[in-house]
Amino acid sequence: QVQLVESGGGLVQAGGSLRLSCAASGRTFSNYRMGWFRQAPGLERLFVASISRSGGTTYYADSAEGRFTVSRDNAKNTVYLQMNSLEPDDTAVYYCAAGNTAINSRLQSGYDYWGQGTQVTVSS
């Protein structure tokens, strides 16, 4: 089992920044690729970004490209999502996830463990 706890969400004005953190415990963190997803009210949960086990490969949704940066510190068992130039459309609950499969990292089915989520609200 891997336990994931997100933090760093909150209320921010449009154009502002937030850094989300996801602390992992349980099994060896570096064995898992990590992903960030988000879910806005009434909508499905969508892919935001992912990072490989070593941190050498990252992928982003089009909506995140150029504004968000995913990173990880395997020594601290933590993955981060730096979000800049935030927009009201970024308002959602953000979830981190850990996976150890060959399934495309943009798919929810590619992850085995999920955190409880952290709320991000961007005001206009």
Image (spheres, helix red, strand yellow):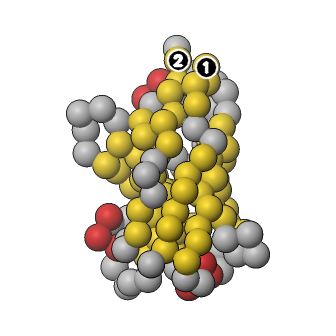
Residue at 49% in and 74% down: 2
Q: Quadrant of the N terminus?
A: bottom left
**Could you tell me which residue is drawn at 34 percent across and 36 percent down?**
40
Distance in Å between CA atoms under marks 2 and 1:
5 Å
Label 2 secondary element: strand
Q: Tell whether label 1 touches label 2 (CB within 8 Å).
A: yes
- Which mark is on residue 13? 1
Q: Where is residue 7? Give x, y as percent.
A: 60, 46
**Where residue 48 sits: x, y (%)?**
46, 52
Residue 58 can be seen in this image: yes
Q: In screen coordinates, is 18 left or right of 92?
A: right
Q: Is residue 1 above or below residue 34?
A: below
Name which residue type carries label 2: Ser
**Residue 76: numbered disc:** none
Q: Residue at x 70, y 75 (%)?
A: 74
User: Residue 39 or 115: which is nearer the viewer?
Assistant: 115
